[in-house]
Image: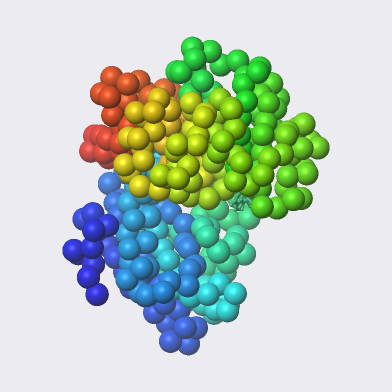
Amino acid sequence: MAVFNQVEFDNHEQVVFCSDKESGLKAIIAVHSTKLGPAVGGCRMWDYAKDEDAVYDVLRLSKGMTYKNAVARLPFGGGKSVIIGNAKEIKSEQLFRAFGRQLERLNGSYYSAEDVNITCADVALMNKETNYVLGLEGKSGNPSPFTAYGTFLGIKAALQHQRGHQDFSGIKVAVQGLGAVAYGLCQHLADAGAKLFVTDINQVAIDRVVNDFGATAVGIDDIYDLDVDVYAPCALGATINDDTIPRIRATIIAGCANNQLAQSRHGEIIREKGILYAPDYVINAGGIINVYYETAPEGYTVEASNKHVEGIFNTLTEIFSRSEKDQKSTHLIADELAQEIIQNGL
Ligand code: NAD
């Protein structure tokens, strides 16, 4: 199987293929970079159609973590792991303990955590065999409120940059997806005086935000066409694409979802359209910042975590200004900033 000539291969320091016969574990751990510290990134369980897809995913996601951690100015490198298989069928204590033993063998060059289909309870099983895991229950706790706070500050930074003020009264925000992060985001926005237009595939989630924050519910597909100031993608990836861009009327796109641009070229298209885009991995770093404080030498405190999350405002402001000066899309500027920080240190 091709690894070194995969398009996503980016001089990853280590790509480890793991298996365990008894538990049926098949996993890949990719350590992209440990330049700024141990590689940190979650473990994803997915029923990949073929092993090549798992390699592609783990290479891509681990590099993304290096950039995300660097721009968040965390002393972490980037890594990611994937366990291959159907989460509804293969999960067992044996399997997660076998994976934990594989983490232990890496001797701290990579720390794992939750990601798609991996819960706190699964990570706790890994933790029976290794301490190289983060985001355990009872430590830094639920990351979502911190991601929500960072996303709110990111929208504020975008307003300040584009409109020259941070006053949310009369500002209309379309929020797509009303899960753990978006609920907190809606709370911040409503408290600040914004008017919310919301959608979700889950009616219970909609009702909660309508009742709690006076939001207006709209249809799943209508969220793109609204005459609003801000579009906040908080559900799925790839919602900024050839079909949606002509429909989006907001002049700011800023939300917590991962991988919002369907393709890199869409970042340039929206810039040319006059839309200010807050790069996803910069605005949604609040959760990983909070997890970092589990490992901070001075110990975990909410105050230290929040203070660091507040840095997202300035980081985005810097990215917006550079984007304007260089006439280049914000997501490319974010990548450049990440590369500079990795090169020069924190
Ligand atoms: P969640 O699962 O709690 O919420 C996602 C919500 O999106 C759910 O309510 C779901 O019903 C809804 N949804 C799914 N498909 C939809 C669709 N087609 N249209 C509208 N709504 C839809 O997840 P979350 O933890 O709130 O995370 C939301 C996004 O933010 C994800 O992309 C996640 O990867 C990203 N993110 C989360 C964190 C965190 O701290 N939780 C950190 C960084 C990034």
- The x and y percentages for residue 22 are 48, 87
Instruction: Determine the residue positioned at 61% across, 41% down.
Output: 222
Residue that sits furthest to the right in the current view = 211
Residue that sits furthest to the left in the current view = 5
Say if 211 sits above or below 37 in the image: above
Q: Quadrant of the C terminus?
A: top left
Q: Is residue 251 left or right of residue 121?
A: left
**Residue 318 vs residue 308, the one in the foreground:** 318
Does residue 342 appear anywhere in the picture? yes
Residue that sits furthest to the bottom in the current view = 22
- The x and y percentages for residue 74 are 40, 39
Does residue 330 appear anywhere in the picture? no
Total numbered badges shown on the rendered structure: 0
**Residue 297 vs residue 113, the one in the foreground:** 113
Instruction: Determine the residue positioned at 55% across, 63% down.
Output: 118
Rendered image coloring scheme? rainbow
Q: Quadrant of the N terminus?
A: bottom left
Say if 36 sits above or below 8 in the image: above
Instruction: Determine the residue positioned at 27% across, 24% down.
Output: 327
Residue that sits furthest to the top in the current view = 164
Q: Quadrant of residue 152?
A: top right
- The x and y percentages for residue 150 are 54, 33
Instruction: Determine the residue positioned at 50% across, 34% down.
Output: 248
Q: Is residue 106 left or right of residue 339?
A: right
**Residue 345 vs residue 288, the one in the foreground:** 288
